[in-house]
Image (cartoon, helix red, strand yellow):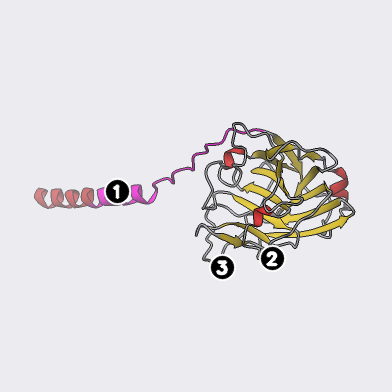
Amino acid sequence: MKRFIASILVCLCFFNCKNDKKETVEEKPEIAKISTKIEKQLRKINKVADTISIDGVANEISWKKAKWYPMDQVWLGDSISNEDFSGHFKLSWNNDALYVLAEIKDDTLIDNTEDPLVKWWDDDCLEIFVDEDNSGGEHQYNHNAFAYHIALDGNVVDMSTEKVGKMYNTHVESKLITKENTSIWEVKLYLYDDTYDDNSDNNTPVKLSPNKKVGFAIAYCDNDHSVERENFIGSIPVEGEDKNRGWIDSNIFGTLLLVD
């Protein structure tokens, strides 16, 4: 009888050990993504106070309350005069998207290349850099961050994981209104995380909420009379000799803090 009871106890211990091991495997924690970014240019961005229509008019209360930020850092080219170029922008957000209002004063607008996927950076365009989780890091041919080039005709292009330009028109809704030398760009930008798959139709934009941090920069490609762009003017100082790194390195982006 004692041997029988001892056998039962051994079996129970064996099965309990197996179950403990199984639970340990199932409850293994996920490895957190490590940020390489040192935060800079932290800006608190207020949530929209009304519905923003993407019409280039910008007469909403949200825009009237929002603060202007300068676009005055020369990333490429020589120093520029206010007569040639000046720019500034505003930001807001709701649960679905980030909103951008940019006012650009440029004496000449150029759209030389008909094919939107050929040298899209050499025509006049607004470029918006966004890192959904503000993690920083390299994003040249991946979607750790995006560098959206918004052309004068509204087409949106960035580098894909195939190392070629790709249209991302579903990510951005924009309207451009130009009167004389002043252009108003109104933009609604959906944010995607680094799991975005260029070969899938099931990508879903990230929902935004208060206290979320987003990596952000904005720039303008300015071409007056050349085959290539003459200037590239951004919103944040970039250290070092090579300042044209936004399309590769999201560590240079500023940081937005979304607030109510």
Q: What residue type is labelled 1?
A: Lys
Q: Which residue is drawn at 63% across and 57% down?
A: 119
Residue 35, image x and y in percent? 52, 38
Q: What residue type is labelled 3?
A: Asp
Query: Mark number for residue 114?
Result: 2
Query: Mark number for residue 111?
Result: none
Q: The magenta stretch spans which residues?
A: 15-40
Q: Within 10 angstroms of label 3, few (less than 14), some, or many (20 or more) residues?
A: few
Q: Residue at x 84, y 39 (%)?
A: 82
Closer to viewer: mark 3 or mark 1:
3
SS type, badge 2: loop
Structural distance between the alpha carbons of marks 3 and 1: 39 Å
* Drawn side of residue 212 relative to residue 89, left or right: left
Residue 56, image x and y in percent? 84, 57
Which of the two labelled residues, at mark 3 and mark 1, occupies the earlier sequence position? 1
Image quarter for residue 80? top right
Is 25 contained in the magenta span?
yes
Closer to viewer: mark 2 or mark 3:
2
| Circle 1 residue | 21
| Circle 3 residue | 201
